[in-house]
Image (tube, rainbow, N blue to C red):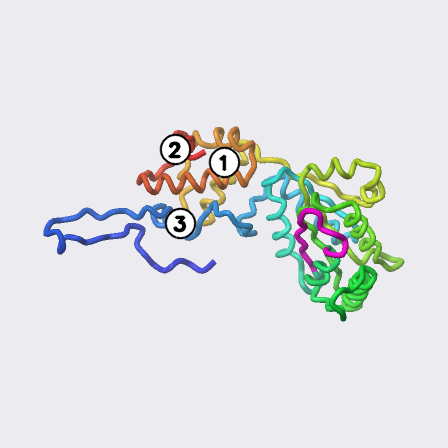
Amino acid sequence: MPPLEETAIVDLVDCSSISGRETLAEPSSHPLRFFGFVDDPFSDSVNPQFFYRTDAHEAAFVAMKRCIEDNISLGLTTAVSGTGKTLLTQVLLQELDPERYRPALVLIYPKMSPAALLREICGELGVRIAGKRPTMHELVAAIHQETMALYLKGIKLVLIIDEVHFLTAASLQMLRTLSNIEIPQKKLVTILLFGEDSFLKKLGEPTFKSILSRMYTRVRLRPLTVEEVEQYVKFRLLLVNGRPSVFHAECFGWLREKTEGIPREINRICHNALQRAALARKPTITRALLEEVE
């Protein structure tokens, strides 16, 4: 991210010429200026730069990357909502060598049909099919053809499917069909599935037994421990040139208890706390201030 324009951390307003008397300089109430940040450390966005690799997150990243490298057809990562699975998909996209891999990220929505899923994949791959309403057979054939064309160039197709818990049984079966694209020596497609923990219950049903057996690698992102909460907050502050001591040591145990270690909830509370602290001209955030914004 390019640096902000050079501005003073304190906004100076000289009103002496208007009022005829001295006016004290008033600090900015914007957290970025008040704390001297170059970016919002707890913004509501998916930015790979802010990916904090706990042991669990690092293990999930390595496992999914190995699925690709070992030509495994299906890999699965599950987590509680807000734990960082979507951010992990962005990190994977960033890490994949474009000369070796062709990644396509598909975001699933509730009740997405198999045809809609295939159209989305084709759209991400830039595959165009003649006619306004191609059949599912034509869509599968087009993806198969594109996969083979990539293989002949030495490039592997990687499908990253996020919010997979929304997929219907028919759409999941379609993914299983795509995972069968192969040559005798190896699979030509790796499909990485990312979803909420509830997806595991769905996979436990007899209908999905054939899909579950294909998932050689299954990992779970767990919430942060209290020690990880502290390091997570400090890590994000340091990334934006902030002081790691902005949050008092008493904050981290409370944050872990209140958020149950879910990064999205930690971000929300910390973001609002910074806003409140800047308005109150408080350079250090205490537990009492956190409790005001929960």
Q: Is residue 207 above or below residue 183?
A: above
Q: Is residue 145 left or right of residue 47?
A: right
- State the residue lying farthest toward the right: 184
Residue 18 in the image, given as x and y percentages of width and height: 14, 55
**Residue bounds of the magenta highlight:** 103-116
106 is within the stretch colored magenta: yes
Kindly identify which numbered label has been placed on residue 230: 1
Foreground residue among 33 and 168: 168
Question: Circle 3 sits on which residue?
Answer: 37
**Residue under numbered circle 2:** 289
Question: Measured along the vertical axis of the image, is residue 287 above or below residue 17?
Answer: above
**Viewer-proximal residue among 79 and 245:** 79
How far apart, in angstroms, are the residues tagged by discs 3 and 1?
A: 19 Å
Q: Amino acid at mark 1?
A: Glu
Mark 3 in CB contact with mark 2 (< 8 angstroms): no
Between disc 1 and disc 2, the foreground one is 2
222 with respect to 180 (left or right) = left
Q: Classify 274 as above or below 113.
A: above
Q: Residue at x 85, y 58 (%)?
A: 182
Reading the chain from its start, which is encountered first: label 3 or label 1?
3
Q: Quadrant of residue 125?
A: bottom right
Name the image quarter holding the C terminus. Answer: top left
